[in-house]
Amino acid sequence: MTGAPRTGMASVREWMSENPAWVALIVLALIALALIIGEGLQEFAQRSVNGIVSGSYIALGAIGLTLVYGILKLVNFAQGDMLTFGAYIAFLFDATLDMPLAVALVAGVLATAALGVAQELAMWRPMRAKKAGMLQLLLMALGLAFVLRYVIQFIWGTDPRSLDADVTSSISFLGLNIGETELIVVIISFVVLTAVATMLRVTSLGRQMRALADNFDLAETTGIDTGQVVLKTWLLAGGLAGLAGVLVVAATGSLTPNTGFYLLLPLFAAVVLGGIGNAYGALAGGLVIGLTQEWSTLVVESQWKVAVSFLVLIIVLIVRPQGIFGRERTL
Amino acid sequence: MIELPVAVTFDFLTAWDFWIAVGILAGIYGIFALGLQLNVGYTGVLNFGQAGFMAIGAYAAIIFVVDLGWSYWLALPASALLTIIVGLLIGLPSLRLRADYFAIATIAFSEIVRDVAQNARDLTGGNQGTINLELENDRFFTDPWFSTSDWIQENLLDPIGLSGQEFGDLPLFLVVWVTLGLLALGLHFLVRSPWGRVLRAVREDEDAARALGKNAFSYKLQSLAVAAVLGAISGWFLAFNLESVSQVAFEPLYTFLGFGALVLGGLASFGGVLVGSVLLWTLLEGFRFLDLPLAADKVSALRFIIVGVILILLMAFRPQGIFGKREEMVLGE
């Protein structure tokens, strides 16, 4: 029992805990390699395309969740239902008022952004003033989720709805298929996600938001108008949730009052995987969740794919609760 | 010809079968919520996976009796033991997490259980996780229960004149509520025992409890295991009450409703759980008697909107619920 092999192991461990992104990448690459060898490149590539589609809207929905979670320490159980809300507003404009889908999309985004601001002013700001505890906020978010979901069900019923988006035409490239709408969804998601991540990095609002996420009280004492920053956070989080909701329905072609709620756990999985409060993390986490869900269909029947993402969530929580890009101290 | 928009009938106030049905649901989900109370109210463990434990209890008991032909005396304790094992397996890695992470992990756990129930057809049989309570040789999972029920009816209820269609489910009501009462009483004393005082210490300040030499993690794990058994017991009664058990009965919605009953009654009070559960289920089921000029899915939506509003208002203005003490509502800084 000389020290050499143990220090070897120890240094590998140290490297792993210091470079979680590389470890995640290596694990994914190994899984990908095994699947390519086992199932063939063509099949694997097609599932990957599908995974990027679902991963892109999961990432978009996860950004708002991660920002609110990071800055306000609020586990927003209503996030999924905000996606649903945005989608139904788009449905209202698209199908009921017979307007173009682009107009409906903008309406869905704006309405959900307004919903974000409204809940901040009516609920979260007063609750912060009362110094409400985490459980109190969590259960309040749960109440809001109920109200949103069932008001939607009250108005529109439980029948599945859809937007006037083309879900049949597809494009073939190198033998891989992607729906035309799906391609547009992926492009919009990536453009918006990159814009948001850049905004968080370079603008002063972005820096203020990150300062709040690091230490809310300290940020306040340094003269940041926290009320304004939080309001803008909700505006952004709401708008992105609305956009994600519309894109989900455009890509999948189906909308029910439960659509967003069923996405809540995959969204949480993306947030936790990427590290809470980290926008790039949500992007990476969303893609990993989307890819693993679709890859799993190569190995198990497709009805298990949601369970696979929950399993990934639990494994990440156990192995590295601060996520790939998160830091130890955010815990 | 003017029709009133809303016709409210008060027949339900005297309809025994209605109150018995509400009482059974309130009792079953009361047992369910006792586990939440122990975890959330007394230990500070945010167990959001209680529906998963209920599912395991119900499915395991049914599979043991129907597929393996075990008697209740073996099947019920075995299913309780199984939920304890699952509770420990879930708790061991995830109870080290921060409370909000644990909440998310446990919802994911309960959804995995539901996915297994839905998709592992060799295990749970039937369509989409709808398990039949019927044995192959024409006996039913509920047979031993029904003979107990008949015995209660003949020996306890018939002599005092409580018989007939309206009182058909009274035996189940009685058994559920006697069980609930005994469990609540037992837990009431348990949390006042030295063991329970450590639980509260863990809830108030885990580091302080640890500094006093108490293994906080082990106490949290024990608390979760007890809640898992309470979930299993509520699952058995659910199976007794239903013609068939389906995975939709274990959606996260039911855990959320359990939390609704919990905070309605108030944290850190087992009596509060009973009251909260009765209030919640009277509200949810009472809507059937409101003759609203609305489609069924709208009426169903309306009652959950009200639950949501109550939850928001409670958290805003009276987070301690009806019976809870404000100073015991200290979760999470």
Image (cartoon, rainbow, N blue to C red):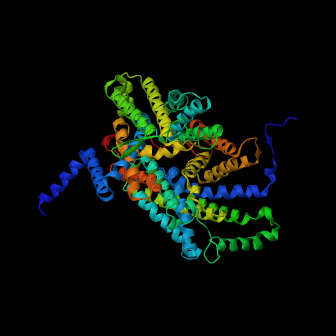
**Relative to A180, residue A16 above or below:** below
**Relative to A110, residue A310 above or below:** below
Number of marks present in the image shown: 0
Please name whichever residue, B99 or A243, is drawn nearer the observer in this view of the structure.
A243
Report the side of B119 relative to B5 (left or right).
left
Q: Measuring from the top left, give residue A256's x and y in whole percent.
A: 57, 43
Q: Measuring from the top left, give residue B256's x and y in whole percent.
A: 56, 48
**Relative to B231, residue B321 above or below:** above
User: Which image quadrant is residue A298 in?
Assistant: bottom left
Q: Quadrant of the C terminus of chain B?
A: top left
Please name whichever residue, B93 or B34, is drawn nearer the observer in this view of the structure.
B93
Residue at image position (60%, 75%) is B136
Please name whichever residue, A31 or B258, is drawn nearer the observer in this view of the structure.
A31
Q: Measuring from the top left, give residue A269's x and y in whole percent.
A: 41, 46
User: Which image quadrant is residue A236 in?
Assistant: top left
Residue at image position (36%, 56%) is B213
Q: Measuring from the top left, give residue B220's x and y in whole percent.
A: 44, 56
Asked whether residue B216 is in view, the answer is no
Q: Quadrant of the N terminus of chain B?
A: top right
Report the side of B170 relative to A90 (left or right).
right
Residue at image position (46%, 26%) is A231
Report the side of B117 relative to A66 (left or right).
right
Asked whether residue A31 is in view, the answer is yes
Report the side of B310 relative to A118 (left or right).
right
